[in-house]
C-alpha cells in the first residue's frame, strides 16, 4: 500500500482513483445522512466530503450511497447453488460479503466438502468467509459421515479453510459443561463464535454465554430476544425462506434504536427462488423498515454490526480506511440497488466466465436400502406425530389415535397425516427412523429429499408406501428432490454435489425447481415450498419433535422418544 499516495488523495492534494460525487451518505456512526463526495484509492475509501476530484468520476445524482451489505449468517447449501451461483444471485442485490456456515456439506462430506466450499468461494466478486462447523453432528441423535471433534476444527483454522466458529447448536452440551463440546469451543481461540440457543433463557442462558458463543439467530419472541440482548448476546433478526421471525422481533429495535448497535439482520436459509424473485438483504431491509426500524439502524444491522461481530474492522462503513464496498440505492424505503462497487470497482462477473472447476464430492449412498417391510409400523397404543408450525422451523408434538389398517399404522389423507422415513446415507450402518407428520397437506403420493438438516440423510414422506419407495429410489441414485405418485416420478431435481447442491447455472436450477414445485402441488400440498419444510423435520436441535435416522428426537425430553404412546 502506497501511504504517501493515499494520504495525498485523502487531503485532496492529488486526484483519487475514483470519486462518487453528489451522494447522500448515511453515517452509521452518528446516525446522520450527509451530502458528500466519496473518494476511493487502492480499493479503500480515502475521503468523505466536498470538493474531491478523481481520475474516474461517478455522479450519484443525490441517491443514497451505503456500505456493501454483509450477510452475517447463512447456509449457502440451502440455496442448492454453488458458491459461484449464490454470489451471482446476491451481488446485484447489494451483498458484497457473506459469512457462511458450511455445516450442511460437512455432515455429508466432512473436510472434503469444506475444502470444496473454500476452493469454490475463491476469486469471486463477493467475499465468502466460512465459519468452522462446530456441531457435526448437530446432536448425538443424527448420523453424519464423520464426527468432527476439536482436532478437526483446529485443522480447519490451520489450513485456512475457515475463520470463526460456526453456530454452536449443542446448547445442552455447553450448559452442562460437556468436555468434548467445550474443547471444540476452545479450539476456536481468538476467533468470533456463533451461537444457537432457541428458547434458552435465565440461568441456562448465562451458562451458555460463558462460552462466548454470543450471537443467536433462533429468537422467536420479543421477550426471548430482549433477555439475550441484556446478557450481551448479539441478536440476529432472521427472515429466511421458512423462518419468518423479523416481524415478531422488530419491536426490539423499533422501540429503542440504541439496541440496533447489538443486532443484525440475517437470512439463515434461503432458496434460489427467493433470492431471484424477492432479493437478499435488500428484501430484509425493506421488511425491517416496514416494521418500524429506522433506515439508518436497519442499514447498520447489515453492514457495520456484522463486520464488528466478525472482527473485520475495515468493513461495514463509508469512512477513511474502510474497504470501498459500496451500494447505490434509489431510496431508503424500497432499497432498490442501482450500482454496486467492490473494492472501489464496479462489481460484476466477467462476461463469458464459467463456474470454477473445483472437484466436488458426490452423493454418498453407502448402499442404503428401503424396503416395504421397513415402512411397516405395527399399530400399538396412540401415535406420536410431528406437527408443522407454519413459517417456523420449530415443530410441535401431537399425540393422536393413529389410522390403522390390518394392524399397521398408515398415512391418512383426510386427516393430513403423512408417513415419514429417514434413512442413513452417510455411513455403512443401516439405520431407518420412522414416524408421522401433519401439516404438509399432501393428498396423495410422496416427496423425497437428500436435503435433511443437519445430517442430510435421505428423507421421504408420503400418503402411501409405494410412492415413498419410488421417491427413495430416485434420490438414492442421484440425490436431490423428487415428487412421486405410485410408481411414477412426476419430477426429479438431482443434486449431484454432496446431495445438497446443483452444478446447474442459477437460471436452469430455478426453472427446474419451479417444475418440481408444480409437481408437488399436484399431490395436494398448499405449502409454497414443502421441500424446505421437509428439510427441517430432521433438525434434532430445534424444538420440539423431529425425526432422524435414529428415530423420534425431542431434546427437551432427553433425546430419543418412542413412536407410540401406551
Image (cartoon, grey):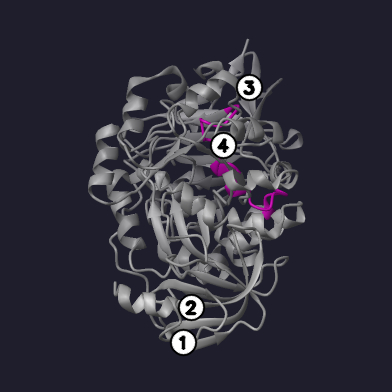
* Residue 322 lies in the magenta stretch: no
**Which dot, 3 or 1, sits closer to the camera?**
1
Residue 74 to residue 408: above or below: below
Disc nearer the start of the sequence (4/3): 3
Residue 61 lies in quadrant: bottom right
What's the distance in space between the residues labelled 4 and 2, CA to CA? 50 Å
Q: Position of residue 291 (x, y in %)?
A: 76, 51
Disc nearer the start of the sequence (1/4): 1
Q: Position of residue 431 (x, y in %)?
A: 40, 29
Disc nearer the start of the sequence (4/2): 2
Disc nearer the start of the sequence (3/1): 1
Disc nearer the start of the sequence (3/2): 2
Q: Mark 3 = which residue? A: 384
Q: Mark 2 = which residue? A: 39
**Pointer 3 with pointer 1, Cβ within 8 A:** no
Whether residue 373 is visible, yes or no, is no
Local packing at callout 2 (Cα closer than 10 Å; few below 14, some 14-19, many 20+) is many
Left or right placement of residue 321 versus residue 414 in this view: left
* Secondary structure mostly seen in the magenta stretch: loop
Residue extent of the magenta highlight: 521-545
Residue 164 to residue 539: above or below: below
Quarter occupied by the C terminus: top right
**Pointer 2 with pointer 1, Cβ within 8 A:** yes
Residue at the limit of the structure toward the top, as seen here? 566
Give the number of the disc on residue 537: 4
Name the residue rendered at 60%, 24% in the picture. 201
The residue nearer to you, when weighing 80 against 446, is 80
What's the distance in space between the residues labelled 4 and 3, CA to CA? 14 Å
Local packing at callout 4 (Cα closer than 10 Å; few below 14, some 14-19, many 20+) is many
**Pointer 4 with pointer 2, Cβ within 8 A:** no
**Which dot, 4 or 2, sits closer to the camera?**
2
Q: Secondary structure at mark 4?
A: loop
Amino acid at each position: 500500500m502506497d501511504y504517501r499516495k493515499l494520504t495525498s488523495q485523502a487531503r485532496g492534494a492529488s486526484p483519487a482513483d475514483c470519486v462518487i460525487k453528489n451522494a447522500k451518505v448515511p453515517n452509521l456512526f452518528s446516525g446522520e445522512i450527509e451530502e458528500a463526495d466519496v473518494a476511493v484509492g487502492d480499493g479503500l475509501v480515502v475521503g468523505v466530503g466536498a470538493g474531491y476530484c478523481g481520475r474516474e468520476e461517478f455522479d450519484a445524482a443525490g441517491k443514497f450511497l451505503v456500505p456493501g451489505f454483509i450477510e452475517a449468517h447463512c447456509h449457502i447449501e440451502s440455496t442448492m447453488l454453488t458458491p459461484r451461483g449464490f454470489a451471482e444471485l446476491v451481488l446485484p442485490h447489494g451483498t458484497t460479503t457473506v459469512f457462511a456456515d458450511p455445516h450442511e456439506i460437512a455432515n455429508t462430506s466432512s473436510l472434503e466438502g469444506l475444502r470444496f466450499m473454500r476452493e469454490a468461494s475463491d476469486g469471486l466478486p463477493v467475499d465468502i468467509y466460512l465459519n468452522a462447523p462446530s456441531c457435526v453432528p448437530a446432536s448425538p441423535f443424527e448420523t453424519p459421515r464423520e464426527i468432527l471433534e476439536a482436532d478437526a476444527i483446529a485443522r480447519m483454522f490451520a489450513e485456512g479453510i475457515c475463520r470463526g466458529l460456526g453456530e454452536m447448536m449443542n446448547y445442552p452440551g455447553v450448559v452442562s459443561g460437556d468436555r468434548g463440546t467445550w474443547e471444540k469451543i476452545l479450539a476456536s481461540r481468538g476467533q468470533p463464535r456463533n451461537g444457537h440457543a432457541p428458547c434458552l433463557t435465565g440461568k441456562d442462558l448465562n451458562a451458555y454465554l460463558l462460552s462466548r458463543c454470543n450471537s443467536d439467530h433462533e429468537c422467536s419472541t420479543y421477550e426471548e430476544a430482549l433477555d439475550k440482548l441484556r446478557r450481551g448476546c448479539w441478536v440476529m433478526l432472521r427472515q429466511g425462506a421458512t423462518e419468518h421471525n423479523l416481524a415478531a422481533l422488530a419491536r426490539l429495535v423499533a422501540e429503542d434504536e440504541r439496541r440496533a448497535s447489538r443486532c443484525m439482520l440475517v437470512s439463515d436459509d434461503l432458496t434460489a427462488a427467493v433470492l431471484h424473485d424477492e432479493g437478499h438483504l435488500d428484501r430484509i431491509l425493506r421488511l425491517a423498515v416496514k416494521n418500524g426500524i429506522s433506515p439508518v439502524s436497519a442499514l447498520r444491522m447489515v453492514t457495520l454490526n456484522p463486520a464488528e461481530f466478525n472482527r473485520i474492522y475495515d468493513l461495514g462503513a463509508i469512512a477513511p480506511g474502510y474497504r470501498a464496498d459500496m451500494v447505490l440505492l434509489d431510496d431508503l424505503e424500497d432499497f432498490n440497488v442501482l450500482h454496486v462497487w467492490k473494492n472501489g470497482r464496479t462489481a460484476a462477473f466477467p462476461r463469458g466466465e464459467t463456474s470454477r472447476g473445483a472437484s466436488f464430492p458426490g452423493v454418498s449412498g453407502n448402499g442404503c436400502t428401503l424396503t416395504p417391510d421397513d415402512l411397516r409400523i405395527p399399530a400399538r397404543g396412540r401415535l406420536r406425530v410431528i406437527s408443522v408450525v407454519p413459517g417456523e422451523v420449530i415443530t410441535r408434538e401431537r399425540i393422536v389415535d393413529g389410522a390403522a389398517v390390518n394392524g399397521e399404522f398408515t398415512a391418512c389423507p383426510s386427516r393430513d397425516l403423512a408417513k415419514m422415513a429417514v434413512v442413513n446415507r452417510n455411513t455403512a450402518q443401516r439405520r431407518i427412523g420412522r414416524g408421522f407428520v401433519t401439516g404438509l397437506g399432501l393428498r396423495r403420493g410422496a416427496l423425497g429429499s437428500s436435503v435433511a438438516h443437519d445430517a442430510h440423510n435421505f428423507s421421504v414422506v408420503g400418503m402411501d408406501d409405494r410412492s415413498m419407495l419410488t421417491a427413495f429410489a430416485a434420490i438414492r441414485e442421484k440425490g436431490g428432490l423428487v415428487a412421486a405418485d405410485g410408481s411414477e416420478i412426476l419430477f426429479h431435481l438431482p443434486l449431484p454435489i454432496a446431495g445438497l447442491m446443483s452444478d446447474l447455472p442459477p437460471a436452469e436450477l430455478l426453472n427446474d425447481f419451479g417444475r418440481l414445485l408444480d409437481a408437488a402441488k399436484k399431490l395436494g400440498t398448499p405449502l409454497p415450498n414443502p421441500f424446505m419444510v421437509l428439510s427441517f423435520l430432521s433438525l434434532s436441535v430445534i424444538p420440539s419433535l423431529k425425526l432422524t435416522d435414529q428415530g423420534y428426537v425431542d431434546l427437551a425430553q432427553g433425546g430419543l422418544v418412542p413412536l407410540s404412546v401406551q
